[in-house]
């Protein structure tokens, strides 16, 4: 009798969690949810058979795991994919994607853009100023990925990023944060309000 009560309790808890998950995601049968980030990544790769996601690119791309476990960066020749996976309870969902390629960098150069900001839950800044050694987004220090090893035309380009809304399923820009760019002496080079 006690065993039946325990089983019923576990079943009720499971159904409650499943129902809450369905209300938040709309994914009733967990078809878009995975137990590991790696499985969510593999599903994303299999569903996105674009020309730029060729098997050759995926084979040669470097997988970079930042300190934020929701993020994964695929860095290949003249292309960077910043993937942000969303986790609800213990299940991982497919990523939102921010892509940088050589066309984006040419566009920055043609328009003489020194600070290019992007936001999709992850606040990202591409900078060309070689004196920048640290970036804060809001109150927190951003992670750094130098772009020189991956782009032929990168020169001093760096990508700074911070997942500022880890619990959000989807985000719309601008981020509403202040980007503060510092030199090696800790002096502020530039402040940009992303509004």
Image (cartoon, grey):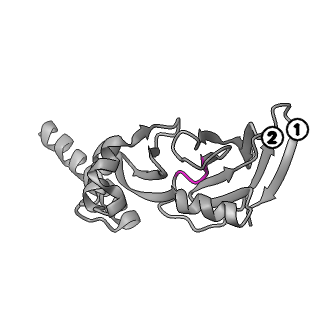
Q: Is residue 90 left or right of residue 166?
A: left
Tell me which corner region of the image, top left, top right, bottom left or bottom right, holds residue 10: top left
In the rendered image of this protein, does residue 44 appear above or below residue 146? below
Q: Is residue 25 left or right of residue 137?
A: left
Disc sitting over residue 187 in the figure: 1
In the rendered image of this protein, does residue 170 appear above or below residue 62? below
Residue stretch rendered in magenta on the structure? 162-166
Q: Residue furthest right?
A: 187
Q: Residue furthest front?
A: 152
The answer to which of 86 and 44 lies nearer the viewer is 44
Name the element at disc 1: loop
Q: Position of residue 45 (x, y in %)?
A: 30, 54
Mark 2 — residue? 182
Tell me which corner region of the image, top left, top right, bottom left or bottom right, holds residue 146: top right
| Residue at 70% across, 50% down | 127
| Residue at 66% across, 66% down | 174
Is the residue under label 2 in contact with that under label 1 (CB below 8 Å)? yes
Magenta segment's dominant SS is loop
Q: Position of residue 183 (x, y in %)?
A: 82, 37
Q: Position of residue 154 (x, y in %)?
A: 61, 47
Calculate the distance from the C-alpha at mark 1 to the C-alpha at mark 2: 5 Å
């Amino acid at each position: 009798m006690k065993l039946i009560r325990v089983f019923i309790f576990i079943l009720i808890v499971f159904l409650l969690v499943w129902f809450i998950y369905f209300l938040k995601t709309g994914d009733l049968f967990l078809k878009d949810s995975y137990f590991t980030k790696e499985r969510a990544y593999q599903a994303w790769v299999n569903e996105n058979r674009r020309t730029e996601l060729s098997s050759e690119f995926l084979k040669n791309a470097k997988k970079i795991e930042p300190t934020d476990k929701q993020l994964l960066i695929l860095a290949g020749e003249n292309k960077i994919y910043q993937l942000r996976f969303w986790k609800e309870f213990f299940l991982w969902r497919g990523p939102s994607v921010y892509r940088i390629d050589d066309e984006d960098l040419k566009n920055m150069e043609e328009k003489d853009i020194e600070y290019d900001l992007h936001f999709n839950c992850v606040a990202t800044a591409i900078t060309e100023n070689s004196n920048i050694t640290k970036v804060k987004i809001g109150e927190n220090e951003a992670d750094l990925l130098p772009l020189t090893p991956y782009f032929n035309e990168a020169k001093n380009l760096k990508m700074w990023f911070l997942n500022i809304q880890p619990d959000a399923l989807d985000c719309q820009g601008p981020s509403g944060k202040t980007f503060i760019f510092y030199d090696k002496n800790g002096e502020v080079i530039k402040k940009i309000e992303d509004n």
